[in-house]
Image (cartoon, rainbow, N blue to C red):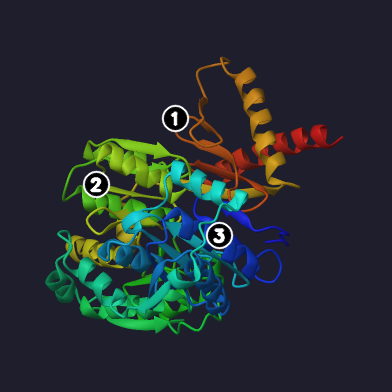
Amino acid sequence: MGKVEKPIVSVSGVRGEVGVSLDVRVITQFAMAFGTFVGGRTVVLGRDSRTSSPTVRHAVLAGLFATGCHVIDVGLCPTPTILLMAKALGAQGSITVTASHNPVAWNGIEFASASGHLLTAAERDELMRIYETEDFALAPWNEQGTLETSEDAVGYHLNQILYSPWLTPALIREAELKVVIDCGNGAGSVVSPSLLRKLGCRVVELNCVADGHFRRPAEPTPEALDELCKTVLASGADIGFAHDGDADRLVVVTERGVPLSGEWTLVFIADFMLRKTKGDIVATVSTSRMLDDITAHHGVALHRTKVGVGWVVEKMHEVNATLGGEGTGGVIYPNIHYTTDGIASLAAIAQYLAESRATVTQVVESMPQYQMCRKKLEIPSQELAIHLVNLALEVYKEAEGIGTEPQLELTDGVKRVWNDRWVNIRPSGTEPVIRVFGEAPTFTAAEQLCDETIETLKMLMKQNLN
């Protein structure tokens, strides 16, 4: 990821490279805006393991104290744990210090409103209005904020998972699964190995010291998991698991040491949940069409949203969905909380394997098979990226009507859909690029879709910059 001079403000919060595009002044001002937004009331605060997180935490505290907030600090925890505690404590908001899957040099803050709910579009607009106009409600000298600490967060989260209606720990114990867990030295280190042991798994820990010195990239892509794959094979494990930096995502490595993309996590768990309860599923436009086949097989509806957990959550509430998520390895469990929870996914997949008595490879081979290609085109600015996607839409609209395919879907960016493949372009919300995702029965076909699309975008950019 190249140097970005300004912090990236997106639906999930604010992120930037520490000492380059993110400094304490930006963080404190956003914290003052958020303290004003929640009316100076109770805010839950937690952080991931990054070495810059203590600095960012202090900047957040300054802004929240200045607006009279009572802060409950739950310490170093995964993002889903922090949001769950905000719900449990009935807080008016929460701030998580994290850059999630971004590189180790990055950090940021993510916001949630009442009881740990992700901000709605209207709430995000109001928060940005306060920040941009500096319309801060600063507290007088005798009404400054206060700090309370809580050490209950991890234990509470574990109990919420262990008492889930879809989980039978005794069955998992009988299966005697051997698992390798790679927490990437992130926040998952403080909870995930413990959960797996409580489920009766034999656990091999890899990168499970929460020191913030990431020994592999924070984003657990297949290319980043070479050590995990080797450890699974060497230890004869039944499965390998890997988290991102704040453990809201989970990805899987098969017993043969083959790393799977994050797409498989939601597919596995959707099939697992729909065997137990029928209900609609919600996923983003760029999530694998394997879900179309899975939901059709179980006779339920699949709803597509814009990319971003907040959009998925809003649609889940609207349709009372059984499950939701993204192809990044993030899955949302309504019985626990409306946020992606990589820790709960450990339990769901362990239960799935225990019930099916199949290997991970056998489960994969029983599923519909598609290959996804992900590429991105760097653009000079986010504004130009948005403009180019709009120009591409006009090009594709002109081509419409020549045959029945592809269909255009405009939920997020431009998605062109054929019967057995699709390609989606959308401006990134976190960096100045256009993301190009394609999926088809073979990787070659998926890559061809992406490459043809990128050539169109390059042509449009050249016309625009001349």
**Rendered-image quadrant of the C terminus:** top right
Q: Position of residue 388 (x, y in %)?
A: 69, 35
Judging depth in this view, the residue of 64 and 27 nearest the camera is: 64
Sequence-wise first label, 3 or 2: 3
Residue 320 horizontal side relative to residue 144, left or right: left
Residue 196 image position (x, y, % from top left): 27, 76
Evaluate whether residue 346 shows in this view.
yes
Q: Residue at x 61, y 49 (%)?
A: 133
Tell me the kind of residue under disc 3: Phe
The residue sitting at 36% across, 83% down in the picture is: 204
Secondary structure of the residue carrying tag 3 is: helix
Check disc 3 and report the residue beneath it: 30
The answer to whether residue 406 is left or right of residue 83 is right
**Amino acid type at image mark 2:** Thr
| Quarter of the rendering containing residue 38 | bottom left
Mark 1 residue element: loop
